[in-house]
Image (cartoon, rainbow, N blue to C red):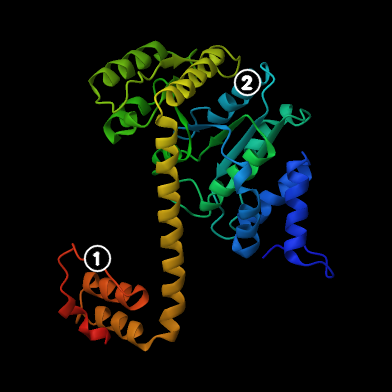
Amino acid sequence: MIRFVHPYIEADTALKDIGKKLLAGDKRALARAITVVEAGGPEGTALVKELFHHAGHSHLIGVTGSPGVGKSTLVDALVTEIRKEGKKVAVLAVDPSSPFTGGAILGDRIRMQDHTLDKDVYIRSMANRGHTGGVSLATYDAIRMLEAFGFDVIIIETVGVGQSELAIAQTADTTILVLMPGSGDDIQAIKSGIMEIGDIFVVNKGDLPGANKSATEIIASLELAHHHTNWAPPVLVAISESGEGVDKIWESAKKHHEFLIETDQLNERRRGKVKTELSEMIAGIARTNLEESIDKSSEISDALSSVVARKLDPHTAAAAIIRKLFGSSPSDNGLERTQTESLK
C-alpha cells in the first residue's frame, strides 16, 4: 500500500497536510490524494473523510460509447469549448486495467497533451480495477478529490464496453452517449436499452457517410422510447477533430444541468449514485469478510464442501453464510431457515 508518510510523522498528520495543500490549489497534492484513494485502505478512507464536506459542487459529465467512436477526441474538444468560458475542467479517463499489474493505459493523457500547460485543466487516467461496469469504486472518491479542489466541470470517460454505459449514468449528472455513423452502434444501442440512459446523443465523425441518417434513426427511436422525465435528449452531429458541433454539445450539457436543478432531479440522481456506491462498497466488504472467514470458519468451509458434493444447493448455502456472517439472511427468496441448519 502506498503511504506518503515520513518515518517521524504520523499518518493522519501527513494526510491532513495533503488535504490542506489540495484545498489551497496545489496540483501535486491533488495527484497524491487521488493516488491515495485509488490505492484504498485506511489512508484513502481518512482522506475522503477529511475532504468530503468540500465536495459536491461540480457538474459531472459522463462520456461513454463503444471503442473507436472518438470519445477521447471529443472530450479534448469539449474541454477546449468549456475553457472558453473560463471554467476549471478535470478529466478522469477510466481505462482498462492490465490483468497482471492493474495499471491503466495512459493513452488519453497523451492524446490530450495540448491542455497540459493550462493550469485550470487536470487530466488523470485511472484503472477500472477489473470492474465490468467500467467504473471502479475509487472513481467515486477521485471525483470527490477533484470537487474539493474546485473544478467547475468534471468529465468522466469510460472504457465503453460491457455495462459501462449504465455505470457512467449512475456516476454522472449528465451522460453523453457517443455513436458513430455506419458502425451499427446506434441500432445496437436501441436493442440493448442504452437509449434510456443518454441525456445527450452525439453522432461523432459527422463527416462520414450516413451521419445524418444515423441521427434521424436515433431521433425516431427516442420518440418511441418511454422517458421518466420531461427532458427531451438532443441528438447532435459533431466532428470532434475540427471541433464542429462541439459548442452545441456543451450548450446542451449546460441546459440539462439547469433542467436537473430546476426540477429538483439533480439531488435525486445523486441519491441514486450514493445508493449504488454504498451497495458496491458493502458488497466488497462482505466479499472480503467471506474470503477471510473461509480460512477461519470450519462451518463455512463445510458449506462450500457440501455444495461441491451436491449435498447443498448454492442458494441455500449463500443464505446460510450470510446468516453466519451477519446474523440475518434474505427472507423473501423462498429459502427456509430449516435448510440452513447444516451450518450450526
Q: Going by the picture, which residue comes out furthest to the right?
A: 8
Q: Secondary structure at mark 2?
A: helix
What crowding class fits label 1: few (fewer than 14 Cα within 10 Å), some (14-19), or many (20 or more)?
few
What type is the residue that disc 2 sits on?
A: Ile
Q: Residue at x 33, y 28 (%)?
A: 195
Q: Nearer the viewer, mark 2 or mark 1?
A: 1
Asked if residue 113 lies left or right of residue 313, the reply is right
- Image quarter hosting the C terminus: bottom left
Residue under label 1: 330
Which disc number belongs to residue 181? Answer: none
| Picture coordinates of residue 56, whole percent (x, y) | 56, 38
Query: Which image quadrant is residue 183 in?
Result: top left
At 36% from the left edge and 73% from the top edge, which residue is drawn? Answer: 326
CB contact under 8 Å: marks 2 and 1: no
Classify 10 Å Cα crowding around label 2: few (below 14), some (14-19), many (20 and above). some
Q: Which mark is residue 82?
A: 2
In this view, 28 is above or below 213: below
| Mark 1: amino acid | Pro
Q: Nearer the viewer, residue 252 or 8?
A: 8
Instruction: Answer with left or right where residue 195 lies relative to residue 64.
Output: left
- Residue at 69% over, 50% down: 33
